[in-house]
Amino acid sequence: MNSFFETIAKLLLSPLLVAQALSVRNTATALPEPPGHRSGQFGTGTPLRLLIVGDSSAAGVGAKHQTEALSGQLVQALGVSHQIHWQLVARSGATTRAALPLLRSQTPVQTDIALVVLGVNDVTSQIPLANLLSARAKLYEHLLKEWGAKRVIVAGIPPLASFPLLPQPLRWFLGLQARRFDIALVNQAEEMGLDYIPFDVPLTAEMMADDGFHPGPNTYFLISRKVAQKILHH
């Protein structure tokens, strides 16, 4: 029913949605991926091998340095009780389909935890849901087989309906799609025996980056703590 409703809305609003999307693309502030290490070792205790794969949020866009981005804050949280061997494989604009060749360009290393941070670009690129689920299954299988991931943790799609940068009705429409995609990804993760972490951080002004589209350091802090808790208290 939601898919049918979206289709009707897209047909009726198509010219306006396209115009708004182009306007956002042309006027949005292009934030860079922050500098800093994308692999390393940190902490003391039981060894834990961590791989983070994803898009601009995984890459830390919205933070000034990787130390205050998702990877840096997660490694800090886990390093209290573990010796973390970690690697970040991420690129701004990456969709689920683009993440697989990005991973294949790396030499696989046996991994305890693989964190997947993708989804926003899948929504904005308007990929059909069936194609997204197929691409996700291939990505997860690659992580499990080639990287030997003992656990795959899937991060939920942020609520695009709360992104300040997006004008209405584009914000409403993409938010509707994001919610539908997210529900499907929850079900897929459950069917494949993967962990899932919902994106339940309120996207108020102080939680967002200056561009109104990416997370800010405060959001990365909260998400990193939720992921660390999931890893440590499984």
Image (tube, rainbow, N blue to C red):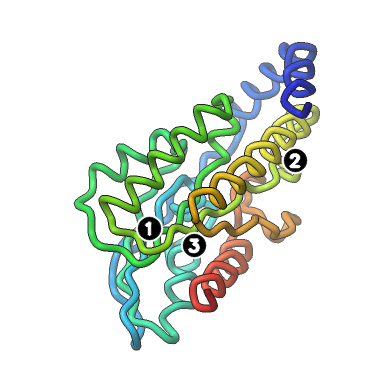
- Which numbered disc flags the more N-terminal residue, 1 or 3? 1
Q: Is residue 7 left or right of residue 111?
A: right
- Would you call the spot at circle 3 few (<14 residues within 10 Å), some (14-19), or many (20 or more)? many
User: Is the residue under label 2 in contact with that under label 3 (CB below 8 Å)?
Assistant: no
- Would you call the spot at circle 1 few (<14 residues within 10 Å), some (14-19), or many (20 or more)? some
Along the line of sight, the residue nearer the viewer: 143 or 155: 143
Name the kind of residue labelled 3 in the image: Ala
Q: Secondary structure at mark 1?
A: loop
Which residue is the site of mark 3? Answer: 69
Residue drawn at x 78%, y 26% as measured from the top left: 1
Residue 70 image offset from top left, x and y in percent: 49, 62
Residue 99 image offset from top left, x and y in percent: 38, 40
Residue drawn at x 37%, y 64% as measured from the top left: 150
Which residue is the site of mark 1? Answer: 35
Residue 69 image offset from top left, x and y in percent: 49, 62
Q: Secondary structure at mark 2?
A: helix
